[in-house]
Every structure is written in C-alpha cells, then in structure tokens.
Amino acid sequence: QKTPRPALYKAFYNNGLQCVCDGVRGVQLKNALPLEELPADIETIDLARFVDDAKRNNDVVLELPELKALKTYIKLCKAESKQDFYFYDFGPGLPFVNAEFLADQLEILPGCKAYAKNNGFNIYFESDDGRGMLCNVRPPEGIQRQKTIL
C-alpha cells in the first residue's frame, strides 16, 4: 500500500495564507485556524496556482444548497444506502461532486459564492474568509444527470 503524501493532510502556508488540501478539495484561509501544521522541511503544492486556475476558468455562478439542508440530505443518504459517499449534482453540464466535500467547503467558507464552467472540472469558491476549489467526480455509469433538489 502506498504511503499518502503528508503535504495533503496538514495545514501549510502558501502566498501568506493558511492552506489545507487533500488533492480533491483545497482552501486558502485569510485567518488561520488552529490546525496541525506541516513541518517546514515538507515540500507543499502551490495551491494558489490551482485555485487561480479554477477562478480564471469558471464563469457560471452555481446555485449552492443551504448547508443545513445539505447535511440533512447526507444523513438521509447514509440511512438509506451502504455507499461510502454521496453525490450532489448541480445539473447536466455542471459539476457532480461528493456531497460531504461540498458541505466541508460551505462550512469552512461561510457565505461563499461558487463558480464553475459548463462541463468543467473544478469549482471555485470565494468568501470573505478565503477561497478554495473542489474537483468534481465522474458520475457512475448509467446515472441520469439531474440537479439535486433539497
């Protein structure tokens, strides 16, 4: 089994902002949180570059769910299914994402706005607290794409 890259599991600083990234979602925070930080000798990714790319390439404003409704949806999905994770569909041609990861972004960046590109890959988030990105996932085979209604 491969050892995960430690730079993807602890906080680090990039362009003067506290960052957290796991390879699928990342945030740059204006006000640091009390998180475990990487040792200085660990090489980190240039998260700003990925977030800048997401910002530059996305021009469709996404309609975000309310956090409370999204968390309720996730709980209901868990009660009804034995899947490891649950999806949130922004609609055909728009991102299809892990619902729990979306909830994390909404929680860490309260009041955020989100932007995507039709048939794009990453969602860009921006709030007064910072900015971030979330990669979409490939929908399972045979699924009929439709916007998740909460």
Image: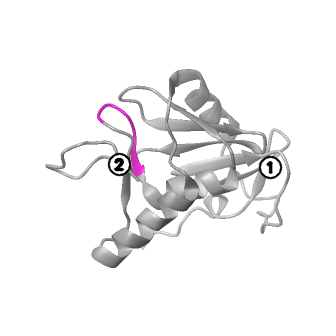
Q: Is residue 6 above or below residue 65?
A: below
- Magenta segment, prevailing SS (helix, strand or loop): loop
- What is the x, y in percent for residue 132? 64, 42
Highlighted magenta segment, given as a residue range: 92-97
The picture quadrant where one finds residue 126 is: top right
Total marks placed: 2
How has the structure been colored for display?
Answer: one colour
The picture quadrant where one finds residue 111 is: top right
Residue that numbered label 1 is attached to: 13
Looking at the picture, tell me which residue is in the foreground, 10 or 39: 10
Which amino acid is tagged 2? Thr
Residue 71 magenta: no
Q: Is residue 13 left or right of residue 110?
A: right
Circles 1, 2 touching at the beta carbon (< 8 Å): no
Which amino acid is tagged 1? Tyr
Residue that numbered label 2 is attached to: 148
Looking at the picture, tell me which residue is in the foreground, 117 or 11: 117
Binning the other alpha carbons within 10 Å of mark 1 as few (below 14), some (14 to 19) or many (20 upward) gives some
Local SS, label 2: loop
Ranked by sequence position, the earlier of labels 1 and 2 is 1
Q: Is residue 46 visible?
A: no
Q: Nearer the viewer, mark 1 or mark 2?
A: 2
Residue 94 magenta: yes
